[in-house]
Amino acid sequence: MPLTENKDQQSRFDAASVVALKMRNDARLLEIRLVDAQGAEHVVSLPIPAGAELAGFLAAACGFMTRLKQQAH
């Protein structure tokens, strides 16, 4: 389920899995390689500062999920 409504559903991508992460120092990019349910690969390239911001969001999400698991026990 999307976090926000997406009026242009054509631009939506639902990843099934992450298959690779790569730092490209030559271009100062973080590349995330994703695969959809049909097996097609997609690459997301982020400037390194945006990748660092994404890492912070992911760390917060992991902490939230850990707290939820602890409350369930």
Image (cartoon, rainbow, N blue to C red):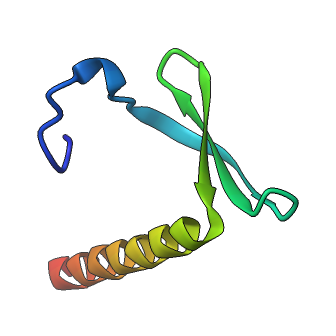
What residue is shown at x 34% (from left), y 25% (from top)?
A: 11
What residue is shown at x 55% (from left), y 75% (from top)?
A: 52
Residue 49 appears left or right of 4:
right
Numbered label tally: 0
Quadrant of residue 64 in the image?
bottom left
Q: Position of residue 33 (x, y in %)?
A: 65, 41
What residue is shown at x 47% (from left), y 34% (from top)?
A: 16
Q: Position of residue 68 (x, y in %)?
A: 21, 77
Towards the viewer: 7 or 67:
7
Towards the viewer: 26 or 21:
26
Residue 2 appears left or right of 22:
left
Q: Position of residue 37 (x, y in %)?
A: 47, 22
Quadrant of residue 24 in the image?
bottom right
Image vertical order of residue 55 relative to residue 34, above or below: below
Q: Position of residue 25 (x, y in %)?
A: 84, 65
Quadrant, the C terminus: bottom left
Quadrant, the N terminus: top left
Towards the viewer: 13 or 68:
13
Name the outermost residue toward the right. 26
Residue 64 appears left or right of 15:
left
Quadrant of residue 35 in the image?
top right
